[in-house]
Image: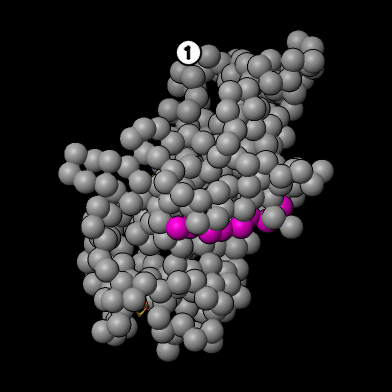
Amino acid sequence: MNVLEIRDLSVDYLSGSGTVHAVSGVSLDLRRGEILGLAGESGSGKSTLANAVSRLLRPPAAITSGSVVYHRQDGTAVDVLALGGNELRAFRWKELAVVFQSAMNALNPVSAVGAQIDDVLRAHAPRMSRAERAERSVELLQRVGISADRRRSYPHELSGGMRQRAAIAIALALNPEIIIMDEPTTALDVVVQRDILGEIRALREEYGFAVVFITHDLSLLMEISDRIAIMYAGRVVESGTAKGLHRAPRHPYTMGLLRSFPRLRGPREELLGIPGTPPDLRSPPPGCAFHPRCGLAVDECAVSLPVLTPGGDGEVACLLNDGTGVS
Ligand code: SF4
Ligand code: MG
């Protein structure tokens, strides 16, 4: 059962020197209650895709084709790209919430974290009394591991991990069906990161929301995701269960990502397992956009665009995919 269906979605933006094809023809399902990991190097279109789906794209970025359909529990379907005004505001908190890359930027620096939850509740749940809102704020903070007495703390008084937890509590305020987390833990140390991800999984069990978790750190996704989609140059190049991808990655790019151990220090973009750099999306290479970096490329790869076909327990966009695996 899908809670969200993305079909053939494309996003372009105009830069001074040409049109950047940030997302190209992405089709992706999010199943109810699952954790879907979205991986790929920076610039692969992960954040742009998430922003398009949550209707947070800002000009000059624009959706040029495709659809996003949200399925409510009661069976009604919502055309997300057609939402406007109040409907869109309600959708964004009650159905889908976003936890941004930097919790410091997402939180209001001049408002205590408890008050920020209260603001969301007051705006979107007008029937709640002041006392109910206060109770709910404390409950939400406690659920993410923040004690009740910290509700009066301002973001700068909290550690990075606590700020991240506060941002998650705010996202949970109205019981959304979908939570999109865009590299929410990148700035945190590994231990705090693992803790928070464990808690997201536990909260998911309790509340039943689906999560789209975005990061370039595939090893992290392997630990916490049910399914994973890999993006390269604005397209999904492989999807499958976390187990399946771990055991038998099919796309040469996924194989490279798996060989790229994330470094604890230094530029996180650097991927040790893949030579070269991601393409310029103003003029992506013809054929398979990965071909200039692919160790398995054949002549046809520079000519034919591979489409997603069944492979492993998901789909693979590689000309060498024959349904059993890239040899
Ligand atoms: Fe490599 Fe060709 Fe497959 Fe692209 S289509 S990933 S270049 S083998
Ligand atoms: Mg990003």
Name the image quarter holding the N terminus.
bottom right
Q: Residues within 10 Å of mark 1 (few under 14, many from 20)?
A: few
Q: Residue at x 40, y 32 (%)?
A: 58
Q: Main secondary structure of the magenta part?
A: strand
Q: Is mark 1 within 8 Å of ligand 2?
A: no
As drawn, is 41 to the left or to the right of 128?
left
Percent position of residue 314, x then y: 58, 72
Please name whichever residue, 97 or 61, is drawn nearer the observer in this view of the structure: 61
Magenta residues?
A: 25-32
Q: Is residue 131 visible?
A: no
Name the image quarter holding the C terminus.
bottom left
Please name whichever residue, 279 or 191, is drawn nearer the observer in this view of the structure: 279
Image height of 98 relative to 121, above or below: below
Identified by mark 1, the residue type is Val
Total marks shown come to: 1
Please name whichever residue, 141 or 20, is drawn nearer the observer in this view of the structure: 20
Q: Which residue is mark 1?
A: 110
Mark 1 secondary-structure assignment = loop
